Image (spheres, rainbow, N blue to C red):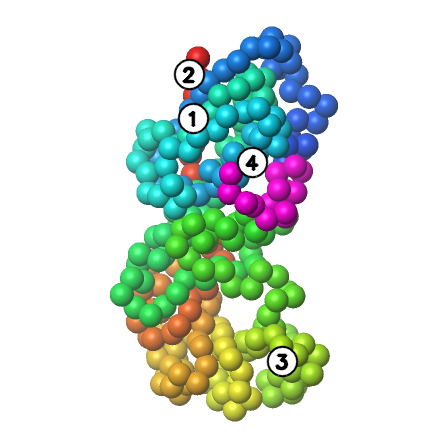
Amino acid sequence: MTTLAPQILDAIQRALAEDIGTGDATSLAILPADARMSGQIIAKESGVIAGLDVVQAVYQIFDTQVEFRSQVAEGARVEKGQVLALVNGSARSLLTAERTALNFLGRMSGIATLTRQFVEVVAGTRAVILDTRKTAPGLRLVDKLAVQRGGGQNHRIGLFDMVLIKDNHIDFCGSITSAVEKARLGAPGLEIEVEARTLEHVREALAAGVERILLDNMSLAMMTEAVRLTAGRAKLEASGNVTLETVRAIAQTGVDYISSGSLTHSARVFDVSFDYLG
């Protein structure tokens, strides 16, 4: 089993507890305690798979004796009807943990599928597709792992691992320059990114020597000019109203990164099912 972050294992424990509560009334009533079962997890549509290692962890956290065998690699493109994994073990265990396992797999594969679509649309440009912090509460690392499996990259994990000076910070401090100065004193050693709403903001951020500039809801013309003004002195990230229809044109302006909250907050759940084999 792939080594998963403690936060993901904690999320699995919480999800199992949420679903099972005092016990699976149906399985406990119908299935003999010693009954065994084999089953398969199947893709009900075509897309990109992410989270089979999480599914394995779900089953084996609930019952260490469950046998789990992935049939496809993480991040693989699969077709409708394709077998994703085989499981064997206690019938009660397989059916009790089934919905929790499929919920994780469906969510992660949906995110990975959408991310792969964005990545493929910008292929041939320099732009890297990034996620945001617009993740399901308590599932931050699950969602961000799915983005990675889809071919995207993670922006900051939380508020602690990077300084991102946004419009409200700037407005409170009175200027980008003042906010950057305070950030350097208060959070030494962390990379600083500044949100820019105008080209004048870009110039001020460059003068302050920040490492990254976030181009917030700028037009294509403004982003193109920002790339020219920056001339490689800072990394540029485009954000705001990024869709599959607009992302190619944004990438062609020459920005380094394109971030989209839709990867995690608007991905449609991928349809998977568990089928009884015997």
In primary-sequence order, the first of circles 1 and 4 is 4
Q: Do the residues labelled 3 and 1 touch (CB within 8 Å)?
A: no
| Amino acid type, residue under disc 3 in the picture | Ile
- Label 4 crowding class (10 Å Cα cut-off): few <14, some 14-19, many 20+? many
Q: Is mark 4 on a helix, strand or loop?
A: helix
Instruction: Inspect the magenta stretch and tell me whether residue 3 lies in it.
Output: yes
Instruction: Report whether 80 appears left or right of 51.
Output: left
In primary-sequence order, the first of circles 2 and 1 is 1
- Residue holding disc 4: 57
Q: How far apart are marks 2 and 3 (CA)?
A: 60 Å
Q: Are marks 2 and 1 in contact (CB under 8 Å)?
A: yes
Q: Which residue is drawn at 39% across and 46% down?
A: 75
Q: How far apart are marks 2 and 1 (CA)?
A: 9 Å
Q: Residue at x 52, y 53 (%)?
A: 144
Instruction: Report whether 262 appears left or right of 174.
Output: left
Numbered label attached to residue 277: 2
- Residue holding disc 1: 86
- Residue holding disc 3: 170
Q: Is mark 1 on a helix, strand or loop?
A: strand
Q: Residue at x 35, y 43 (%)?
A: 76
- Nearer to us of marks 3 and 1 is 1
- Label 1 crowding class (10 Å Cα cut-off): few <14, some 14-19, many 20+? some
The boundaries of the magenta stretch are 1-14
| Amino acid type, residue under disc 4 in the picture | Ala
Q: Which residue is drawn at 62% across and 15% down?
A: 26
Q: Where is residue 28 in the image (x, y as percent from the top left)?
A: 64, 13
Residue farthest along the bottom direction in this orientation: 207
Residue farthest along the right direction in this orientation: 22
